[in-house]
Image (cartoon, rainbow, N blue to C red):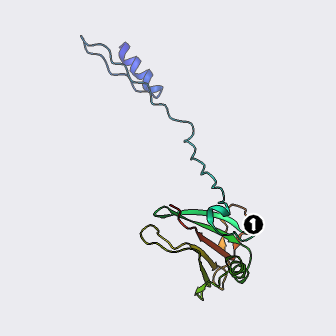
Amino acid sequence: MLAVTLAVAILAAGQTAPPAARPGQPPRVAPPPAATPAQPPAAPVPAVEAPPAESTLGVPIYPGAQFIASYNAGRGQRYYIFGSAAPFVDLVTYYRNALKQRGELVYEVPATHEFDVGKFDEERMAFPPGVVIKDFQSDVSQGYPNPKPGGQPARFPTIIQIVPVVSR
């Protein structure tokens, strides 16, 4: 009768009764409930990549251009992306003067101009070293979105990609 009363009291409290011990066996002890974290662990905050120095790139960076990111190109190379609020034509003129070469218009739409700054060695390079200017503003695009929240300008009309010469 005491066992029935105890079982009813436990059920009324919303708990399950511990299993009854059999004669000759030690009583079972229920394991403690697993602790659940109050909050999920915070996601790691990505580190902000520092802009490369012109000495690392081997070419000048257009004045006022904002560093966006760099990417592993493979074979020990990286390429660096910059955004600029300046028009495509202004950037092409700047790099023509700075690099003392005409470069080449490789696409008319979207306008893409390329300057070679070193010899391409397919044995040790994934991309030829150079500067590529791309016009991202057109009838169908307002420009390359600024990846920095609240960053100005909100969209870059022109993007600069720099692939430095691999030094080994």
| In this picture, residue 168 sits left or right of residue 81 | left
Across and down, in percent, residue 44 comes to: 57, 47
Q: Residue at x 39, y 24 (%)?
A: 31
Number of numbered discs: 1
Closer-to-camera residue (140/92): 92
| In this picture, residue 85 sits left or right of residue 39 | right
155 lies above or below 51: below
| In this picture, residue 16 sits left or right of residue 163 | left
Across and down, in percent, residue 20 comes to: 31, 18
Task: Name the amino acid type tagged 1.
Answer: Gln
Closer-to-camera residue (2/29): 29
Answer with the quarter of the image where residue 55 lies: bottom right
Q: Residue at x 24, y 10 (%)?
A: 24
Determine the residue located farthest toward the bottom in the rendered image.
108
Q: Which residue is mark 1?
A: 152
29 lies above or below 95: above
